[in-house]
Image: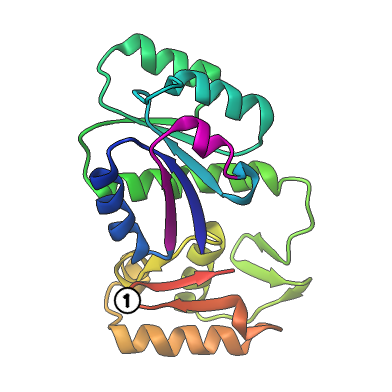
Amino acid sequence: MINILMIEDDSEFAELLAEYLERYDIKITNYEDAYLGLSAGVKKFDLVILDLTLPGMDGLEACEEIVRKYDIPIIISSARSDIGDKITALELGADDYLPKPYDPKEMYARIQSVLRRYNKVENKNEVNDFEIKADTIYHQGNALVLTPAEFEVLYLLIKNRGIAQSREQIINSSSTMSDIKGKSLDVIISKIRGKLSDPSLIQAVRGVGYKLV
């Protein structure tokens, strides 16, 4: 599960977003006050969604403090239309800026994008149990013998590791997958699991699809 700290004084707005993201195995913990949010243990979260117009501490101040103290990606979510605020937030170190109002689907896409970029940098010098070379995927140093469909499913899950991928996203990820039905996807996942040293690395996310943990 992805845990997100949200600092947003519109509780109804935060609740609606939380309900939508829950289906993608993303949990939002919201605080309406920046001071409370910053004292909630920022390090235990994977990402911060931060409003700019907040009681007490301004969102730009909160952004600056988070960047100074923690290594965590930040998405600014604000109704402020001043381009200066957007520029300042990005210069302070925010990773993305999404103006309100927005469709929750867009926020989900932004979360995926930011975490994907962040994890690439974070894991750049770490030993990864998966390695992709040309048309071959290696797991713990061993080349996996995969069908084209299995390769593309596993490739997508690796590139979005830790982020739930819907069945539609997986099936539509390539031309090879375009004719695959839901039950066929389950069979492909089962076969991929059987080729990994730890089948539990691929988890089903109820009501959504699958993710690689």
x 63%, y 68%: residue:
136
x 38%, y 83%: residue:
185
Magenta segment:
26-40
Position of residue 166 measured from the top left corner of the image (x, y, whole percent): 35, 68
Position of residue 21 measured from the top left corner of the image (x, y, whole percent): 34, 58
Residue 121 figure quarter: top right
Q: Look at the image and name its color scheme.
A: rainbow
Q: Is 45 situated above or below 37?
A: below
Position of residue 130 measured from the top left corner of the image (x, y, whole percent): 68, 66
Q: Is 105 situated above or below 205?
A: above
Tell me the residue that label 1 is attached to: 207
x 70%, y 49%: residue:
123
160 relative to 130 in the view: left or right: left
Nearer to me, 139 or 107: 107
Q: Judging from the image, what secondary structure is the residue with disc 1 in? A: loop
Nearer to me, 153 or 61: 61
State the residue lying farthest toward the top: 84
Q: Quadrant of the C terminus?
A: bottom right
Count of marks, rendered view: 1
- The amino acid type found where label 1 is placed reads Gly
| Residue 28 falls within the magenta-colored stretch | yes
Q: Is 69 situated above or below 161?
A: above
64 relative to 152 in the view: left or right: right
Nearer to me, 163 or 76: 76
Nearer to me, 201 or 48: 48
Residue 128 figure quarter: bottom right
What crowding class fits label 1: few (fewer than 14 Cα within 10 Å), some (14-19), or many (20 or more)?
Answer: few
x 38%, y 43%: residue:
110
Would residue 174 be seen by someone viewing this image from the given angle? no
Position of residue 25 measured from the top left corner of the image (x, y, whole percent): 43, 65
